[in-house]
Image (cartoon, rainbow, N blue to C red):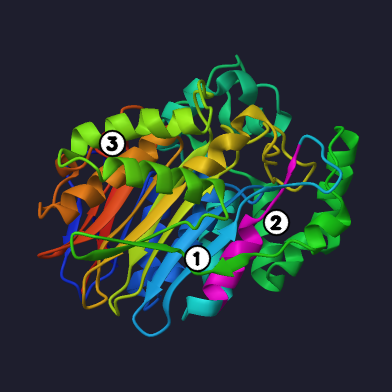
Amino acid sequence: MDSTLGLGGPSGAAASQSMGLAVGDEPFAVKTGTAILGQGGSAADAVTAMFFAMSATYPVAVGLGGGGICLISDPVKGVREFDFLPRAASSGGTYAVPGAVRGFYDLQSAFGTLPWQRTVSGGEAYAASGFPISHALWTRLGNAQNSVRLDAALAAEFMNENGTPRPEGAIATNLALSQTLAAIRLSGPDGFYKGAVADGLVRYSASQGGAISAADLADYRTTVTAPRLMNQGGYSVALPNAATGAGQFAQSLFTNAARSADAEASVVLAVRQSLASFGVSTLPSDLGGTGFAAVDRNGQVATCAMTLNGAFGAGHTAGGSGVLLANSPSAPAGIAGAFLTPLIARDGNGRAVLTGVGAGGPNGTAAIAYAFLKLAGGQQIGRPADMRSTGAAPMVTVNVISCQTVCVALPDPGGHGLGAATSE
């Protein structure tokens, strides 16, 4: 049984460090994560369960067709980075090769404690039995309605007969997605990257001028590596490494921001400087990104930044699979991967004191940088108001679990997410 607090910006969930916490932009997925923690699951189990739940309840930013970056810190195994971004198909084309299913399987296999099937089943149940459209999803649905109308499966799930978005609280189902999730639950990544689901993705991609091949799917591999480590204010902070666009942008922003004692002013200036250094002048309004994090009662922490390279990805559901395909990295929204910034800051004893993520745009990276700079400057982060709002939430977002005096799960102060704690 989980005790949930913190819907929206005004408050967050607090817990002793013997309890688990989860935070994210979509409340039903966060509740799924805390339920997993309450069953004795690890932080890796919790973020995996949150991903599969969001594939049903928050498909504007998360889906089986997308990917992301996760960082995990374990008291015994140390800190690792899992990169599984949506990649360009070997022959180019409109759609990206999905990485998320493979990535979360590898993460959960290495750091999970519960059976794989249990981490997938929550999302499968939401897709099959239905879920109320949350305020978080409804807000972004309204902004992306023009593209949603053009896809028959999306329109059937989220639009009224008159072509307007269904209201907040309306029950949405996706039976095709539930069947794909069942295949993943039973067969792991082989249920997605091989067999009937993979064949359907390849056929649909070819019919729409895409170029995803069977080999692209079968050969997809997660990159597991050490994250970039920086030291400041007595803390060691893990960030995506330089092999990713996210790591390059985060390094540029953090380096520029750390030059000033004024955290607020420094991150604002650093965003401008970093964007200029990458030659970025304009961005799509919704890059289809989000982030979530979890802490378990044994001290393991995990944080993930996800994207579909655009709101609802490419806006195309692959045949009868229920899978939303992501845009290729070469598309305008393909730059989304550069603004995925999971972060874990540890003290001198190796204890994670700040686990968080910025996603969806440069202001997401700026907001998580601001939180860390406040921590490094000796300030408390105990309320959502202690964070810098992204200014464009929920399209751009920041979510944090801070473990200073006690652990608190803090959703974006400008968003509609949830911070939740398990009961003792």
The residue that mark 3 highlights is 267
First of labels 1, 2 by sequence position: 1
Give the residue type at disc 2.
Answer: Gln
Q: Is residue 115 visible?
A: no
Query: Dot 2: within a 10 Å radius of its alpha carbon, few (fewer than 14), some, or many (20 or more) residues?
Result: some
The vertical placement of 58 against 232, above or below, is above
Q: Secondary structure at mark 3?
A: helix
> Where residue 69 sits in the image (x, y, percent)?
52, 56
Which segment is the magenta one? 95-109
Magenta region includes residue 246: no
Q: Secondary structure at mark 2?
A: helix
Q: Quadrant of residue 159?
A: top right
* Rendered-image quadrant of the N terminus: bottom left
Q: Is residue 350 visible?
A: yes
Residue in view at x 32 percent, y 41 percent: 256
Give the residue type at disc 1.
Answer: Glu
Nearer mark to the viewer, of 1 and 3 = 3
The number of numbered badges drawn on the structure is 3
Residue in view at x 53 percent, y 36 percent: 288
Distance from label 3 to label 2 (Cα)?
44 Å
The residue that mark 2 highlights is 179
Horizontal arrangement in the rendering, residue 321 relative to residue 49 (left or right): right
Give the residue type at disc 3.
Answer: Val
Q: Quadrant of residue 392?
A: top left
> Where residue 136 sits in the image (x, y, percent)?
39, 36
